[in-house]
Image (cartoon, rainbow, N blue to C red):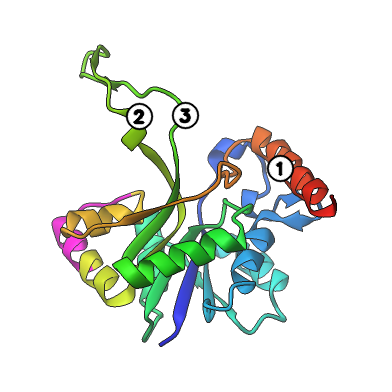
């Protein structure tokens, strides 16, 4: 069976403080969305790509990929989970569903492939990185309640990859409860499943604020230098 990647591009991007949707902002000559989608087009295990979009950006998104047969589009929902559901409902059959934030344009092919391989083995996998800072858990009044062991803490990123049937069942269970999560691993966890963490790279940043564009350009320049050495 085929594997389907869902690229989430229907967010409002309010923290970017730009009149242009952050998916359409350019990083060294290519839009954020182009860089995200092209990373998955380069992976042979990905058979189709579904991009979620807001209605006002749909035409612009389509124009970027008008010559790519693998890429299709669906209108997103009001939340991340609803956008994923809208895309999932268009998939008839798949072995794996691969979910990625379009705002992470620096994801590398090897990280996608490693997460897919882990999901094939464990049914659910996500890429992430060990946290660098000591984390404090606060009580309701803002006082430190505990300090978790940093060696066991990861900052989760995307892609997050799941067996399609398991993901569909988890989504059905969660939607019956009325929960709405900002992370797809939570659906699997809430349904009693386990997610294998794949160690990724700190360069897989999420474009959120204007400063992130400059940071992304710096990371790309460093990659180009390394590739020419």
Quarter location, residue 92: bottom left
Residue 78 seen anywhere in this rendered image of the structure: no
- Element at label 2: helix
- Image point (32%, 21%), residue name: 136
Judge the density around disc 1: few (<14), some (14-19), many (≥20) Cα neighbours within 10 Å.
some
Q: Which residue is mark 1?
A: 219
Q: Which residue is mark 3?
A: 132
Upstream in the sequence, badge 3 or badge 1?
3
Which region is colored magenta?
A: 172-181
Q: Is residue 134 above or below residue 191?
A: above
Residue 205 seen anywhere in this rendered image of the structure: yes
Judge the density around disc 3: few (<14), some (14-19), many (≥20) Cα neighbours within 10 Å.
few
Q: Which residue is mark 2?
A: 150
Rounded to the nearest angstrom, the CA distance separating label 1 from label 2 is 26 Å
Rounded to the nearest angstrom, the CA distance separating label 2 from label 3 is 8 Å
- Element at label 1: helix
Q: Which mark is residue 153?
A: none
Is 213 positioned to the left or the right of 166 in the image?
right
**Viewer-proximal residue among 83 and 132:** 132
Tell me residue 128's x, y (percent). Answer: 44, 47
**Viewer-proximal residue among 72 and 163:** 163
């Amino acid at each position: 069976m085929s594997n389907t990647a869902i690229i989430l591009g229907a967010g409002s991007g309010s923290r970017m403080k730009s009149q242009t949707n952050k998916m359409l902002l350019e990083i060294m000559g290519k839009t954020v969305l182009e860089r995200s989608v092209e990373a998955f087009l380069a992976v042979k295990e990905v058979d189709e790509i579904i991009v979620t979009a807001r209605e006002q950006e749909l035409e612009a998104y389509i124009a970027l990929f008008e010559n790519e047969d693998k890429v299709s589009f669906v209108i997103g929902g009001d939340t991340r989970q609803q956008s994923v559901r809208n895309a999932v409902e268009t998939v008839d059959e798949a072995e794996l569903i691969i979910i990625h934030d379009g705002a992470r344009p620096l994801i590398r092919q090897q990280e996608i492939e490693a997460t897919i391989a882990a999901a094939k083995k464990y049914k659910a996998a996500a890429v992430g990185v060990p946290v660098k800072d000591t984390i404090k858990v606060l009580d309701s009044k803002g006082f430190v309640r505990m300090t978790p062991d940093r060696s066991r803490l990861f900052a989760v990123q995307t892609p997050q990859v799941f067996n399609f049937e398991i993901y569909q069942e988890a989504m059905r269970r969660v939607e019956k409860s009325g929960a709405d999560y900002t992370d797809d691993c939570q659906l699997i966890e809430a349904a009693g499943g386990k997610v294998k963490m794949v160690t990724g790279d700190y360069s897989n940043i999420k474009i959120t604020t204007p400063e992130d564009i400059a940071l992304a350009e710096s990371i790309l320049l460093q990659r180009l230098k390394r590739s020419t050495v």
